[in-house]
Amino acid sequence: MLTVKDLYVSVDGKEILKGINLEVKPGEVHAIMGPNGSGKSTLANVLAGKEEYEVISGSVSFLNNDLLEMSPENRARNGLFLGFQYPVEIPGVSMVNFMKAAVNELRKFRGEKPLTAGAFLKLMREKKELVELDTQLTNRSVNEGFSGGEKKKNEIFQMAMLEPKLAILDETDSGLDIDALKIVARGVNALKSSESSTIVVTHYQRLLDYIVPDFVHVLYDGRIVKSSGKELALELEAKGYDWIKKENGS
Amino acid sequence: MGVVVENTDLSLKLAGHFNDVKEKLFLNSPDVINAHRQKAFQDFVSQGIPTRKNESYKYTDLQPTFMPDYTFIHEKGGGDVALHEIFKCDVPQLDTYMVLLQNGWFYDQDSRTGVLPEGVIMDSLENVAKQQPELIEKYYAALAKSEDDPLIALNTAFAKDGYLLYIPANVEIAKPLQIINLLKSDTDAFITQRNLVIAEPGAKVNLIICDHTLNSNKYLSNSVTEIHIGENAQVDYYVLQNQHNDSASLNTVCIRQGNDSTVRTNTVSLHGGLIRNSLKVVLDGENAEAGIFGMAFMDRRQHIDNFTRIIHAKPHCQSTQVYKNVMDDKSSGAFSGLIHVVRDAQKINAFQRNNNLLLTDEATMHTKPQLIIDADDVKCSHGATVGQIDNEALFYLRTRGIGEKEAMLMMMNAFTHEVVQEIKVVPLRERIDELISRRLNGEVARCHECAYDCDS
Ligand SMILES: Nc1ncnc2c1ncn2[C@@H]1O[C@H](COP(=O)(O)OP(=O)(O)OP(=O)(O)O)[C@@H](O)[C@H]1O
Ligand SMILES: [Mg+2]
């Protein structure tokens, strides 16, 4: 699915990712944890194709394509999805038009006809129910005036609409109440299959109670310094990051 | 080596032309129009073609515009072309009464588009001024004063024809009235058009003005429109400007509102070489309301200048102004908006905003709000922004599979959405929405299928 090799990335001349290696196979769930500022969102954004980040060296292959050569829209059309840590508000672009454009671009890419208005609305309704997104929200502009939790739910709603092969969820659990957390987890689990994979970036073990990871990685100072099974998350929850920092010489 | 042409030379050239054709101008013209001609000419001579030293023309250099040798069109063309055959409005659902003007001259109303309600006059200004001078005497040149502005002076000196719309008291024209101004001449041409709208108390009309060039000759058109809105009357005035890159379109619109009246203007500048829209609204009655909107889409070296003056002369009124510009390539533009609340015009709400989206580093925009408030119980606000496309938002859309170009389009449409929403004639709004998309997409958006190709 995804193979990241020796990835070095810098922003404004500052090196942030310093040799990332990561292998995600179909059907797997990976959790990435790590202290603030360690580079988790940078990794997620680079994978999604954000141009501000400069790839110094390394390679990324996604479904046997050279991911770094692809435009953000082509990555998405090939099945990559990023749930943003801070979803942006886009006044004037309605949720409905936005989703219609996204769904139909995807269909066009796959050689399918655009959805009829009726079929599209039905799909919207189904997916809104799945993530219990307030119906009123899709009548508004994208994320405009949404609460923090609503924005996160909206990310999962979009993911449900687009059914990606690889979903990268950057702190989708932050700012969610317990009920919303369960709903989000349900949304993620509903999409899970042997063909699709998920990378969840999180600070908290509690999400991993609902989305059970196959692997937990610790990202520290631009490197993955530890990888293990789901028990690592519990250990981090109990002990914090000091021992990791010490092991890595600071 | 370039030849330096002084502004005075250009002004003298125009003045010389006036003297040459003076006899012809007076001949056959109605007295009502002739009565103002000589004074207007003197007013022009004393003001000259405006330079950028003139505060009102600070951001638009008209010298290059007046430089070429234009043919003046002081007489009505032969009407050899069946204009109705050239145009087939491709918006069937836009059911309007359609009127055509060519090079500033009233051509006719397309009889196939229906018969106007009884008492309504939609005709050539020259005709009506001859046959019913008493109807227009007190309105003509009452709002557009030649001593105030050189372009008004020039227009009044050369004025021959244009359209006259008269709506009797309490008559509502249900279908929109569409006025199509065509520029089509065998040579580069200087066009003068003079229009007059009189909405008697309680009258109601939706006007749609479409400005088009039909071939690639250079055009300079200098038009003046006076709109008198009686008590409790309502006028919606939509303008769609779609001319080619070698055209200069100078438009002056002067509006006076009576008690309880409403005016709504929406000027959509889709295309044009140089466009100057000067709009003056005098809220001269209590409880009057003015909604003044505009948007422009400029690229290459196009230039847009929206110059508005909202005069609150009476208490208890409200005015709203929103102008939005999308500027690409090396285009340039200006918005100057004055709100003047005169002494003792209390309980006024006046709002103004100008937002600009620059798509390149080379595009430029000047924005200049100006408030003169001589009353104390007034709510007045203004704001202006000049910014670029939000890259974070663009990235967000693209990560959902929406292509870069399409995403840009969505963002630009979002930017002008607020102004588009103010078009209350729904089929027109949908049509303009589509034209804007095509315009932003790089296709030239003509609103008519025409038999002529004009290189835009
Ligand atoms: N555009 C940028 N310009 C400058 N520095 C940046 C930029 N983006 C990220 N950084 C820096 O890169 C480092 C990693 O940031 P990143 O957002 O990837 O951290 P994170 O692991 O996601 O942190 P958090 O847990 O707080 O979300 C930080 O020091 C951050 O300040
Ligand atoms: Mg982060």
Image: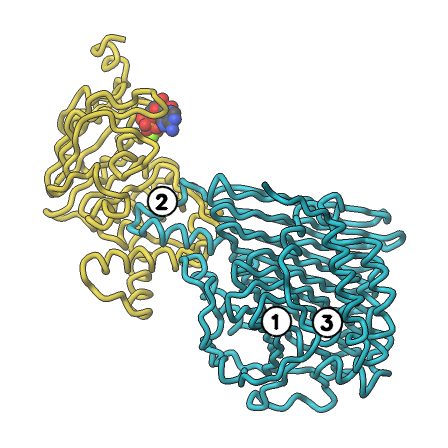
Q: CA distance from mark 1 to mark 3?
A: 14 Å
Give the colour chain A carries in the figure.
yellow
| B235 relative to B371, above or below | below
> What secondary structure is found at the residue carrying circle 3?
strand
Residue type (three-letter) at the residue carrying disc 2: Tyr
Q: Earlier in the sequence, mark 1 or mark 2?
A: 1
| B263 relative to B414, above or below | below
Q: Which mark is residue B209?
A: 1
Percent from the top left, x then y, of residue B204?
70, 78
Question: What chain does badge 1 belong to?
Answer: B
Query: In screen coordinates, is B268 left or right of B453?
Result: right
The cyan-tinted chain is: B
| B73 relative to B436, above or below | below
Residue type (three-letter) at the residue carrying disc 3: Arg
Percent from the top left, x then y, of residue B222?
68, 64
Percent from the top left, x then y, of residue B382?
68, 46
The residue that label 3 is drawn on is: B194
Percent from the top left, x then y, of residue B180?
59, 75
Residue type (three-letter) at the residue carrying disc 1: Ile
> What secondary structure is found at the residue carrying circle 2?
helix
